[in-house]
Image (cartoon, rainbow, N blue to C red):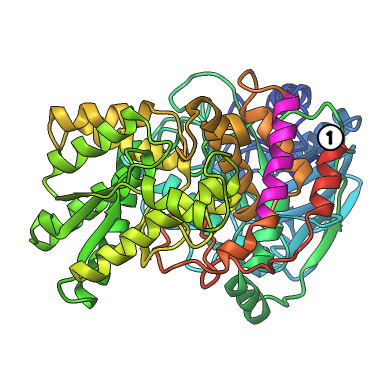
Amino acid sequence: MRYGYVKVAAAVPFVKVADCFYNVERHEAMIRRAEEQNVEMLTFPELSITGYTCGDLFLQPFLLESAEKAICQLAERTKDLKMLIIVGMPLRAEEKLYNAAVAIQEGKILGAIPKTYLPNYREFQEKRWFDSSLELAYSTVTIGEHEVPIGHDIIFKCGDVGVGVEICEDMWTPVTPGTRMALNGAHLIFNLSASNENAGKNRYIKSLISSLSSQAITGYVYCSCGFGESSTDLVYTGKAFIAENGVMVAEMERFKLDEKLLVSDIDVERIRTERLINSSFRTAASVYAGDKLSVVPFKLKEADKSFEMTRPVERLPFMPSTDNLEERCEEMSQIQMVGLAQRLNHLKGSKVVIGVSGGLDSTLALIVAVRTMDMLGRDRKDVIGVTLPGLGTSDRTYANAKKLLNLFGVTAKEVSIREAALQHLKDIGHDGVTEDTTFENAQARERTQVLMDIAGMEGGFVLGTGDLSELALGWCTFNADHASMYSINGSIPKSCVRLMVRYFADSNRFGEELSAVLHDVVDTPVSPELTKDQLQQKTEDIIGPYEVHDFFLYHMLQNAYSPNKIFYLARKAFDGVYTREQLKEWMKIFARRFFAQQYKRNFLPDGPKVGVVSLSPRGTWRMPSDASASLWLDAIEKF
């Protein structure tokens, strides 16, 4: 295990029904394939040693004896491997027969877990052959020369990593064995299954697995049998899913008449952290856990520096590629609209004042304000858009701002801040020429003062436009663009703001002319435009790309990853885009600025939480303003 990841796999081999030794050969071949991909834990389908569709052959002692010899043979053949291997077989114990999962590692059989819930309805008749694990009287069973634990109460453990096993129908019950094991310390649940195909069933199973992994905050590996099983009455196509805390990490392609191996990585470290953060999980564990489960030790491979993740790393985790982009953008915008509508209703007819610069953030805020007025059936003229040209305003952004106000049909005002800013600089003894921080901040604060006063005069409130990325980096002026009466973009990172504005541009819902302006806004480099030299004011040239900082922010706050792990993931996500040295430098900038700028975040205005991360001191992030970044910076320096 490296960076907290365990490489897991689900294998669907060819089988011949009731031919145990042929099946063992296919099992070993797939185990060797998995070993080549550095798999640490591997599961096969339900009853994979014999095949699931043996019917009354399960009651033939000869078949059961052959299955026992076959599992011992498989253990012996794989004794050179540290992989934890889980296979399905019929297991005779206490003059009863159990549908069991058997775990083997390094030539040893570690334990057996019988199925608890036996389906005996519709096409399934398992009670004809098998007994439930609840019928067991003893806690051990002999398999060949191995005397091993048996029961539904077994967790396999290596250090802090716990593994539980359930079988097919077990996961379809109201309270699953897997959930019980998760509450007792299992971080990974393996399900050996034999689920036949019905039209629409696959989608349901997928949603069920996703839900189970989310509720139990666990990794879930599901593996169902495939080609070679009898098709007398049912069809088995071989399917597998790997899920992690509600997210489907990998899915096996169905309807392929070949052996299939699904490999991916489960982030056990994240699962453990999420359980630490989630107070509801801890409460549930204290109420429902505490059962006397048997702990069976196993081994994990030693961490290898050559470890490479199988699962892809999202470059934009706030807007994952697995989601429908248009649907996500519309959902985020609707959340903003409902939040703003509630504030407008509360203030009974208040107008909205927005400083419109022609940049991304103010454009998104303007779109939200206009759509909210439309939703409430109010006049768009109740949105007052103010252009505030300053000493560094470019012709491009100024022209776009004017077009936006005109085409959206809002009330447009213009107040130049040039003379007021220069007078203020003169009054405090600044030469008005040196383009230092004071020169820039004076303009930003003058703009905010103008907006606040217009709001007071018009009976309105100032709608903030700053985004999550700027708050994380402190790339805003205290008591200037940092301040507003309602901050509509405060939990949306810059990378998402760009995608949302592009979404509205591409949708053409406001007409072709407005779409053209929106596209130009998206294409304009991000800049505060507070100095006369525009080439020196491109934000991403100074601090690094926002998509990289958003990546750091997501994994630090949402996943609570270490600097080392975040850097590894960043190198994977941005491989071929940015160099290792660039990522390291930008990560240092992020750490320094994130810790140094908390005082600004402690004074945030109201604003809706739209995405998974918020920096509001009243919401999901509370941090002292004088916390030290030394640990993080020292770790980054060693990369």
Residue span colored magenta:
580-594
How dense is the environment of label 1, judged by Cα within 10 Å: few (below 14), some, or many (20 and up)? few
Q: Is residue 184 above or below residue 564?
A: below
312 or 409, nearer to the observer: 409
Give the SS element for disc 1: loop
Q: Position of residue 350 (x, y in %)?
A: 19, 70
Q: Position of residue 124 (x, y in %)?
A: 44, 50
284 or 560, nearer to the observer: 560
Q: What secondary structure characterizes most of the magenta part?
A: helix
274 or 335, nearer to the observer: 335
**11 with respect to 506 (left or right):** right
Q: Position of residue 396 (x, y in %)?
A: 32, 28
* Residue displayed at 44% across by 52% down: 423
Q: Is residue 623 above or below residue 322?
A: below
**80 with respect to 61 (left or right):** right
- Residue 490 in view, yes or no: no
* Residue displayed at 47% across by 21% down: 256
The reply to whether the magenta stretch includes residue 588 is yes
Quadrant showing the C terminus: top right
611 or 120, nearer to the observer: 611
Residue annotated with mark 1: 639
Residue reaching furthest bottom? 287
Amino acid carrying label 1: it is: Phe
* Residue displayed at 84% across by 50% down: 110
- Residue 261 in view, yes or no: yes
Quadrant showing the N terminus: top right
Q: Position of residue 125 (x, y in %)?
A: 46, 52
The reply to whether the magenta stretch includes residue 525 is no
